[in-house]
Image (cartoon, rainbow, N blue to C red):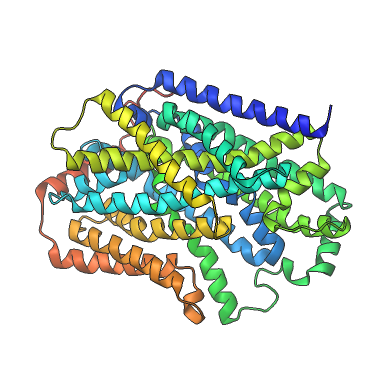
Amino acid sequence: MSDQLWLYIALGAYFAAMILLGYLAYRRTTGHEGYMLGNRGLPPAVAALSAGASDMSGWLIMGLPGAIYLAGLIEAWIAIGLTLGAYINWLVVAPRLRAYTEVSRNSITIPSFFENRLRDRSRSLRIVSSIIILVFFTLYVSSGMVAGGVFFESAFGGDYVWGMLLVTAVTLAYTLFGGFLGASLTDVVQGLMMVVALIVVPVAAVIAVGGPGEAYTLISSLEPAHFDFFGGTGLTSVTLIGVLSGLAWGLGYLGQPHVIVRFMALRHPREAKSARRIGITWQIVSLSGAVIAGLVGVAYVAQNNIDLGDPETVVLLMSQALLHPLVAGFVLAAVLAAVMSTFSSQLIVCSSALVEDVLKVVRKNPPAERTLVTLGRVCVLVVALIAAVLALNPQDSILGLVSFAWAGFGAAFGPVVLLSLFWRKLTHWGALAAMVVGTVTVFTWSEAEGGIFDLYELLPGFLFAVITAVVVSLITYTRNEDIEAEFDAAVALVRDETAPERAGV
């Protein structure tokens, strides 16, 4: 049996498993809330692995190892920042958001939570946040499609467009019908595949180059600065900007709708603790594996005189060269898993923004439950088609596309999420101003070059948005007894260890 046939068998088995899980989720999905939020029934392990897998996307197995391969451990500050950010997100945001979204009129989307929490009768907060979701997620979904096309080019020497369309079609097959539950269940399998791949490939590569000692010696001789967290130049103004930019990635977690919606879907706020332990363990192992893969790739490529055209394909190359074709096929499937897990989650959030947050504002009499679910599926398809058009001629790297969208959400939503959960005096005018300032800062900062403007746009966008929210809220604040009572009820639900939890998936 040819090596190529083994690869196709592994990919075929993976695609079939994803579609099967989507079908099972379809059978268990009832009603609009079930399609959009799984009826708040995710067990901790499912929520943790789903949040991790939907967060990381193709950059975990392609973008990050490629960056480490090129620049060394100075790029690892991104991984450090993400780990710290994810831990804080699970510790601080998860239990409070789970409680508050239920108490605040059972909000099932981030825009609806903002509106309900802040009593925004103008509906402007809901509309603006929905527009931000659609703009940045269309770019984010497009990055997933680009990763799928690049994957098929590198792994099979196939056509970029056909590869991108195949990945899109399979992802749509289980997302359209399975909804949030389908995306979450497939995320669990995809998350496990990703972490196994990021253990197997670096270990195999280290063994192939002669062991850890030989790998370290060879990398040090080829790229002396690769093991220096400051890029070999010491802590200069340039490296300080690089370090701060890497750590700033962690701030983005606070505002990622496709990640924090998993918090809202937990059965009970108290389960955030066990979910945090599972999720952070998964993340540390996965990110460590990606960093090691990028480093050892330098030694492996040099030792075997390989002409590596695209650094973001270094994990794909090593898996095909070092592993049995069937095992390599499942590693390649794990790359697709990283892409598709994020892709599907983002499509669901876009769909919820269009149906739950735009349609219900435009129409005074919302359609029936069955019609809402159908419209949700139509919206998933429309967003995917727009993103596919953008992905036909990619103008940026996978990491570049992801970093811009990550910054947009982190700056626009992160400060508002945090303040809405922990500060009683936040007003809808303060939240609206913060979202606008955060978004505008990300767009303008990313266009400037040189000096302080080399700083990752998420950090200034987040800081300016926080300042704006606080100042505008203090100017426009008036005490509202309903908001005060709801705030207290959310705190009480977080502390309640005896309340029954919902049935799990």
Residue 417 appears left or right of 52 = left
What residue is drawn where x is 10% and y is 52%? 480
**Residue 10 appears anywhere in the view:** yes
Q: Quadrant of the C terminus?
A: top left
Give the quarter of the image for residue 382.
top left
Residue sitting nearer the eye, 388 or 144: 388
**Total tally of numbered discs in the picture:** 0
Q: Position of residue 112 (x, y in %)?
A: 25, 43
Q: Position of residue 188 (x, y in %)?
A: 54, 33
**Residue 141 appears anywhere in the view:** no
Residue 74, compared with residue 134, is above or below; it is: below
Residue 381 appears left or right of 419 = right
Residue 256, compared with residue 270, is above or below; it is: below
Residue sitting nearer the eye, 470 or 26: 26
Q: Quadrant of the N terminus?
A: top right
Residue 380, compared with residue 370, is above or below; it is: below
Q: Position of residue 347 (x, y in %)?
A: 42, 40
Q: Position of residue 438 (x, y in %)?
A: 34, 64
Give the quarter of the image for residue 305.
bottom right
Residue sitting nearer the eye, 31 or 471: 31
What residue is drawn where x is 81% and y is 48%? 205
What residue is drawn where x is 64% and y is 67%? 74
What residue is drawn where x is 41% and y is 30%? 179
